[in-house]
Image: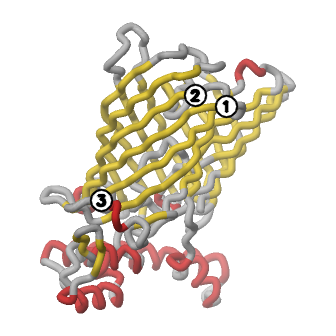
Amino acid sequence: MWQYRAVLSIALVLTSTSAYSAPDDVIAKCSETKNGRTYIPKERFAALAKNLARPLLAKFDDECKGYLTKEQQRRADKGAQDDEKGYLQDLKDMASAGGKEIPAEQARTRLKLEEDNFDLPFLIRDAYHIQSLAALPKARDDAEGASISYTRDNKGSNDIIAATGAIIGWNVLSVDSKKTAMFVPPGFTRSLIAPGVEFDQQRNRADPTKNVDYLGFRFIGELEREGPIFDLNYLRYSGYLKTDSRSDSKIWGGYLEWQPYRVDWGIGGGQNLFGPTMLSFTPLLHAEYERVTNAGNVSGLTTGDEYFRAGAILGANMWFRYGLLRNLTLAAQYRYLPNLTNAGHNKDAEYFQATVGYNLTSSGNAAISVKYRDGQTPGNGTTVRDIKTELAVKF
């Protein structure tokens, strides 16, 4: 049966700049790793200096050569044209609200020219939204986030409070730190290790049997490698413990995941379809193993259950650089992970989530969104089929 719920939510998302736009990423790109030591060879000094001084060069000079090929230059020119149109639209929006003149401080704040200087060591986001930790989309281009919601059912005299999301220490360790240089295997260009916790909590005052209580403690490792077909390949690995706020249930598991990244194909990064329309497509191959050592009060599980799932996870984001639809963002994710063990236990995982958001600010930090969910949610595996209306704030 369909369930419609109107909720007021606050969603927080830490944004990241495009790959190789921050100084740390440029240094990582121009570095080499040998015998567990990461260093910058002398022959790359000049190219590194050029990349640090020219952000657009840094964004498209994938191999730290200090110059762009014809194809890279074409992509850079197209990106600059799109940025120009976006900035012009920002300026027009500010002028229409405040007159012909724009205070310099307002322009600095609204255009986010100082955004790169603000970087938290942890990330707050929708745990169900899969993206590379090294190349997250900007707030205005992403419709997903963590949420805290309150629903008042006047007809049933009921209150429902829910919180869903994840807190991930994505920048606690990185390839530029001496602590993690040893974790960069030969052939890989970057390593990232991120501990975190994800949560899905719901408290139903009228009917406690509908409460949702899930906590997941995990670490995520991410390795980056350049390739002949894709600009970058991300290999992720994770170990985790699923439990609840009382630690009654215990489900141990881990997963392996592969994600390709190629900007000019729109895989991982944004690709211009036509006019202002941008699309980012995220395909993943995913395999996970879980064992239930204590089912606790989790419905549908039995202590001793053991299963292995493998399949595909497909995600996409669409946004608009300028024009009437500039504040609109769309996102969708579909995952199908059939269980390859324990025949008859019906532990396949199938889930679809679609989100339409309208940014209330030019930066995308505040938005109104509508989310549709259908299937077994990642994490606690709760079966849902609902629609949520949210007031979202993303950072």
Write down the quadrant of residue 24 in the picture. bottom left
- Tell me where residue 138 appears, x and y as whole percent: 47, 63
Cα distance between the residues tagged 2 and 3:
32 Å
Q: Residue 65 has which mark?
A: none
Mark 3 and 1 residues: CB-CB less than 8 Å, in contact? no
> Is 48 placed above or below 14 here?
below
Q: What is the three-letter code of the residue carrying label 2? A: Lys
Residue most extreme to the top: 344
User: Depth check: 225 or 101 in front?
Assistant: 225
| Residue at which label 3 appears | 224
Give the residue at x 58% y 28%: 250
| Residue at which label 1 appears | 247
In this rendering, does residue 323 appear at all?
no
Q: What is the three-letter code of the residue carrying label 3? A: Glu
Give the residue at x 31% y 42%: 284
Mark 2 and 1 residues: CB-CB less than 8 Å, in contact? yes
Element on which disc 2 rests: strand
User: Depth check: 352 or 242 in front?
Assistant: 242
- Tell me where residue 1 appears, x and y as whole percent: 59, 16
| Residue at which label 2 appears | 250
Give the residue at x 25% y 61%: 188
Give the residue at x 71% y 26%: 211
- Of badges 3 and 1, the one in the foreground is 1
Image-based side of 128 in relation to 204, left or right: left
> Is 164 placed above or below 189 here?
above
Bin the neighbour count of mark 1 within 10 Å (Cα to Cα): few under 14, some 14-19, many 20 and up.
Answer: few
Bin the neighbour count of mark 3 within 10 Å (Cα to Cα): few under 14, some 14-19, many 20 and up.
Answer: many
- Tell me where residue 369 appears, x and y as whole percent: 59, 47
